Amino acid sequence: MPIFSVRRTARIGAAATAVLAIIQPVSSQDAPKTIQVVPADPVVGEYVHSQMELIAGLRLNPDGTFEYGLTVGSLDERAQGRWKRVGRRIELTSDPRPVAPVITTGAVELAPDQAFAIRVVAPNGRDVPGVDLRIEFDSGTPLESYLAGGPWSLPPGEVRTPRFVTFTMDAYRLRSERLPLRADAGTVATFLLTPNDFGVVDLTGAHIEPGGDGLTLYRPEGSMQFKRTKG
């Protein structure tokens, strides 16, 4: 189930303080370059969504900037930028626009007497967990699998010749190019994750609709209802 499909709003309480703490303040270096002053707009304030292990916060500032943060399980995401009222709707624009992470081809390492393996590593050399992969062969149906955070090998009995691999991390909107793959026994094909703005989501084009004592955030993944916190 998409994490943004929830319509139920839970109690706020101490969760409000926790989630608003994960929202990163806008620094002087990356603050939106153009701001507007929106005095007396009733939508200005802090809002929280809380559900099971998911908690999210949204802050609409009177200067026309916003900050957003979400945490659920191992996923954290945040955003910042500008908001403006267009009729009843509040339209969001991320500023600066985040640069998506990418996965590219790295070195091929020797591993004598070992089966061929694939690794996806971060800049610190550690294996990256939570990466889906899709391998295309010289014939037949592609194979889809998952990297749990270490080397991955072809299933026993697979005799087809791999030709290409594609990596995805849907939660971070990451999809690699279709990368050539040579699966020689005794080698490890290493692929490199360049984080860029890993965990920063682009809310450009998303919008908000106020209602009652809260608001609803609409984005391509779905909608999420927020309740205003009591200051």
Image: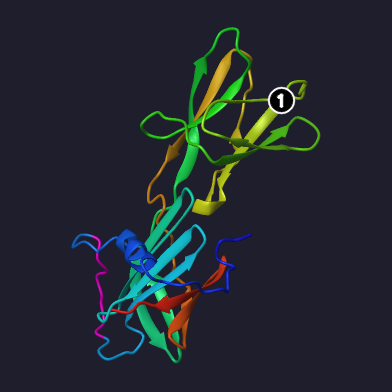
- Name the side, left or right, on which 191 lies relative to 94: right
Which of the pair 182/171 is nearer the observer? 171
Is residue 172 in the magenta section?
no
- Name the side, left or right, on which 200 lies relative to 27: right
**Location of residue 52 in the rendering, given as x and y in whole percent from the top left corner:** 52, 61
The residue labelled by disc 1 is 155
* Amino acid type for the residue under numbered disc 1: Pro
The residue that appears at 27% across and 69% down in the rendered structure is: 32
How dense is the environment of label 1, judged by Cα within 10 Å: few (below 14), some, or many (20 and up)? few
Q: Which residues are magenta?
A: 30-37
**Location of residue 151 in the rendering, given as x and y in whole percent from the top left corner:** 55, 25
The residue that appears at 56% across and 51% down in the rendered structure is: 170
Which of the pair 12/166 is nearer the observer? 12
Image vertical order of residue 125 relative to residue 6, above or below: above
**Location of residue 207 in the rendering, given as x and y in whole percent from the top left corner:** 47, 77
**Snapshot quadrant of residue 121:** top left
Q: Secondary structure at mark 1?
A: loop
The quadrant of the rendering that contains the N terminus is bottom right
Image vertical order of residue 167 relative to residue 113, above or below: below
**Snapshot quadrant of residue 226:** bottom left
The quadrant of the rendering that contains the C terminus is bottom left
Q: Is residue 173 visible?
A: no
